[in-house]
Amino acid sequence: MINLADIHKSFGGTVVLDGLNLFIEKGEVTVVIGQSGGGKSVLLKHIIGLLRPDSGRVEIDGNDITTFNDRQLNEIRKRFGMLFQEAALFDSMTVSQNVAFPLVEHTKLTKSEIGEIVSEKLSHVGLKGVEDKMPSELSGGMKKRVGLARAIALEPEIILFDEPTTGLDPIIAGAIDQLIIDIQRRLNVTCVVISHDIEGTFKMAHKIAMLLEGKIIEYGTPEEIKRSSNPALKQFLEGNIDGPIKVI
């Protein structure tokens, strides 16, 4: 469904993506792991067209979106949902208004129809009775759930998750991981997750990709990743200081 082919991207002479190749299967959860500041979020922004590569192709169902104009990009983005690292809720809006935002912006549904969808999506993420609360009244985990409800409001085909469990305690992080699994199965969507959480990665992923020095150095099922003899991958999974990945 998503094919990143020979992607190169630099910022001010700093190479971030260096001939990256990654194929993301339809209807699967693909988790991208790697060092902090290693380009994982940059990769995600290429998938949704927020960044254009210096060279290479970003194909969605065979269409190279690097050639798209703004109108075409806006159309294809309607097929995406995105959960940002900090949930990115609008502080001045209620929970209900936050979830309703993409429906108000991109559909001609009535107020009552939007209200029904908002309630349905909030129930999908295990939240009820919080419609009138403000984001400031919510815990970190609840904010992530509201962000996910908003991400699925337009029933996207692809959902992108940028470190969805960062800053959460292990119990809440585990609940978010399970929520991603449940949403993917219920909606049969394609999910791309950026994560540092190794335990959560092995729990939710159909495929895992390791990003290092601008390239995908290993890709496979959780079992294949566990069996890999790649020294950099093993060092990262085990959290060792010693190894080919240099700690700055």
Image: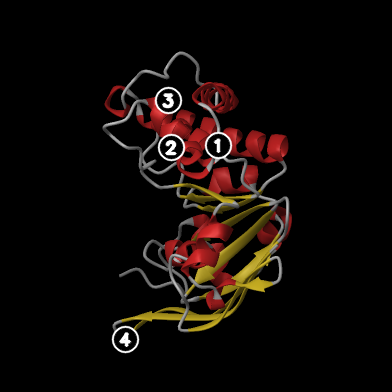
Q: Earlier in the sequence, mark 4 or mark 2?
A: 4
Quickly name the residue at label 1.
153
Residue, x 46% and y 32% (percent of image)?
Answer: 100
Between circles 4 and 3, the one closer to the viewer is 3
Q: Amino acid at mark 4?
A: Gly
- Secondary structure at badge 1 equals loop
Where does the image place residue 177, in percent across and percent down from the top left?
A: 56, 38
Quadrant into which the C terminus falls: bottom left
Q: Return the residue nearer the eye: 153 or 26.
A: 153
Report the side of 246 relative to 119 (left or right). left
Using a 10 Å C-alpha cutoff, classify the residue at mark 2 as few (fewer than 14 neighbours), some (14 to 19) or many (20 or more): some
Quickly name the residue at label 4.
13
Instruction: Indicate which disc residue 161 carries.
Output: none
Where does the image place residue 152, in percent across and percent down from the top left?
A: 57, 39
Instruction: Indicate which disc residue 96 carries.
Output: 3
Task: Assess whether mark 2 and mark 4 are in contact (beta carbons under 8 angstroms).
Answer: no
Task: Assess whether mark 1 and mark 2 are in contact (beta carbons under 8 angstroms).
Answer: yes
